[in-house]
Image (cartoon, grey):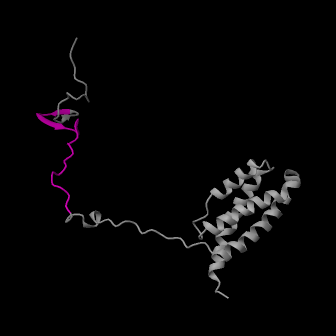
């Protein structure tokens, strides 16, 4: 059994091997070479200094954006608007809520109002927690339509809250 070396094995020779040799009247013509090994990567043993990359080594911590505090007057006006719109929306599902519609709206409005008074500071501060709190509270009190009411509340807030905040803060004080 003849012993052969695989073309790409680690024991293969590191010198280039000609792909084809042609003999024409005592002249040897070589075509393209096949290189079996790529040259090794070379890394510098010199350390990176501040002179080479001064901007990379002097990284400043990112500036923290501070959201404004909630505005009580805005919270009151927006809570009233939220309540009116939620009643309109949930009245379309009267068969789901039955006689418990007012109780559902009251709980959602109370949680939303608390969020506006304590947490909401403008665009970028709308959280999901008040809406999950609504659903949990409605389920704990065994009121109907908890997912529907929480979803309607969240969708209203996503569609109107940031826009209303911008409008509120863009108009001059009276």
Q: Nearer the viewer, residue 46 or 158?
A: 158
* Residue at 72% over, 52% down: 137
Quarter of the rendering containing residue 26: top left
Seen as rendered, the residue at the extreme left is 26
The part of the chain drawn in magenta is: 21-49
Left or right of residue 168, residue 15 in this image: left
* Residue at 17% over, 30% down: 13
Left or right of residue 164, residue 50 in this image: left
Can you give x and y, in whole percent of width and height, for residue 19 in the image?
23, 34
Left or right of residue 113, residue 119 in this image: left
| Image quadrant containing the C terminus | bottom right
Seen as rendered, the residue at the extreme bottom is 174
Can you give x and y, in whole percent of width and height, for residue 99 in the image?
89, 54
* Residue at 17% over, 34% down: 14
Quarter of the rendering containing residue 113: bottom right
| Image quadrant containing the N terminus | top left
Magenta region includes residue 159:
no
Can you give x and y, in whole percent of width and height, for residue 64 in the image?
45, 68
Q: Main secondary structure of the magenta part?
A: loop
Q: Give the answer, above or below, for where 82 lies relative to 107.
A: below
Can you give x and y, in whole percent of width and height, for residue 131 in the image?
68, 56
* Residue at 74% over, 48% down: 140
Magenta region includes residue 40:
yes
């Amino acid at each position: 059994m003849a012993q052969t070396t695989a073309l790409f094995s680690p024991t293969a020779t590191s010198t280039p091997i000609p792909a084809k040799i042609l003999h024409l009247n005592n002249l040897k013509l070589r075509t393209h070479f096949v290189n079996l090994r790529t040259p090794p990567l070379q890394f510098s043993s010199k350390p990176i200094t501040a002179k080479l990359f001064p901007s990379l080594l002097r990284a400043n911590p990112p500036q923290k954006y501070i959201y404004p505090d909630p505005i009580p007057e805005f919270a009151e006006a927006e809570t009233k608007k939220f309540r009116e719109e939620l009643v309109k929306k949930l009245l379309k599902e009267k068969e789901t809520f039955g006689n418990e519609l007012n109780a559902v709206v009251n709980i959602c409005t109370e949680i939303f109002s608390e969020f506006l008074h304590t947490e909401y500071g403008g665009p970028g501060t709308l959280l999901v927690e008040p809406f999950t709190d609504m659903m949990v509270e409605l389920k704990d009190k065994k009121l109907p339509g908890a997912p529907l009411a929480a979803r309607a509340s969240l969708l209203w807030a996503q569609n109107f809250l940031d826009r209303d905040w911008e409008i509120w803060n863009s108009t001059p004080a009276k």
